[in-house]
């Protein structure tokens, strides 16, 4: 993590805990020429808009006071979501066996996205098992991102 996201995480963590939530991720990204600071929260049973508002209202003035970001930015607090990104080793451990999408920088077997059940994570390498039971391992340098996916089945 960057110094900015580390600092914001440390500031946000006790606030989220007071709201009955935990921090899932903090990102500081530039999109379409504008900077965004996003704090993603999580909670057993799901995050509500009231949870996001509570964390945002308490964290916003602290960010103004500490001023970890010298430039102008848009601040957002939101749920990590059902199809959240998995980034840290503990994320992968928590969702081992879950259905996910592995996005790659370059195609493997003709595709840059592979879907399957998370079966392994070691030093950034991810192993998934597809519906047919075939396993695929992707090395850290191949992976652009991993996200949980909601799996829908026809009746």
Image (tube, grey):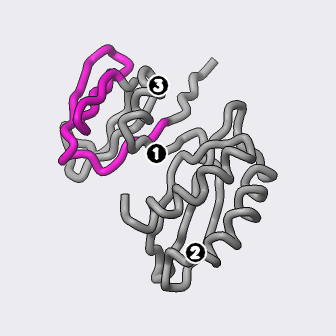
- Taking 84 as reference, is 133 left or right? left
Sequence order check, earlier mark of 3 and 2 = 2
Which badge, 3 or 1, is on the more N-terminal residue?
1
Q: Which element is circle 3 on?
A: loop
The percent position of residue 93, horizontal first and vertical second, equals: 41, 27
Q: Quadrant of the C terminus?
A: top right
As drawn, 58 above or below 79: below
Q: Is residue 63 left or right of residue 61?
A: left
Which secondary structure is most common in the magenta stretch? strand
Query: Which of the two residues, 57 or 153, is positioned nearer the viewer here?
Result: 57
Of marks 3 and 2, the one in the foreground: 2
Magenta part of the chain: 119-148
User: Does the segment drawn in magenta span residue 122?
Assistant: yes
Q: Secondary structure at mark 2?
A: helix
Q: Which residue is mark 3?
A: 98
* Image quarter in which the N terminus is found: bottom left
Residue at x 40%, y 32% (from the top left corner): 92
The 10 Å Cα crowd at callout 2, few under 14, some 14 to 19, many 20 or more, is: few
The residue lying at 42 percent from left, 23 percent from top is: 96
Residue 8 coordinates in the image, percent (x, y): 53, 62
- Taking the spot 38% from the left edge, 33% from the top edge, the residue there is 115
Q: Residues within 10 Å of mark 1 (few under 14, many from 20)?
A: some
The span from disc 3 to disc 2 (Cα, nearest Å) is 38 Å
* Neighbourhood count class around disc 3 (C-alpha, 10 Å): few under 14, some 14–19, many 20 upward: some
Comes first in the chain, label 2 or label 1: 2
Residue 154, horizontal then vertical, whole percent: 59, 22
Q: Position of residue 52 (x, y in %)?
A: 72, 54
Residue at the image point whose x is 59% and y is 39% from the top: 82
Which residue is denoted by mark 1 in the rendering?
Answer: 85
The mark total stands at: 3
The residue indicated by pointer 2 is 66
């Amino acid at each position: 993590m960057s110094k900015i996201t580390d600092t914001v995480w440390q500031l946000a963590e006790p606030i989220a805990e007071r709201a009955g939530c935990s921090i899932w991720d903090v990102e500081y990204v530039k999109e379409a020429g504008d900077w965004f600071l996003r704090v993603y929260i999580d909670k057993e049973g799901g995050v509500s808009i009231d949870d996001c508002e509570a964390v945002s209202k308490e964290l916003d003035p602290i960010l103004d006071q500490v001023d970890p970001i010298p430039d102008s930015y848009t601040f957002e607090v939101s749920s990590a979501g059902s199809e959240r990104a998995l980034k840290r080793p503990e994320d992968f451990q928590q969702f081992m066996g879950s259905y996910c999408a592995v996005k790659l920088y370059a195609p493997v077997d003709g595709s840059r996205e592979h879907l399957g059940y998370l079966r392994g994570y070691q030093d950034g390498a991810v192993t998934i098992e597809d519906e047919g039971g075939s396993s695929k391992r992707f090395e850290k340098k191949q992976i652009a991102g991993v996200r949980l996916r909601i799996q829908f089945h026809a009746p």
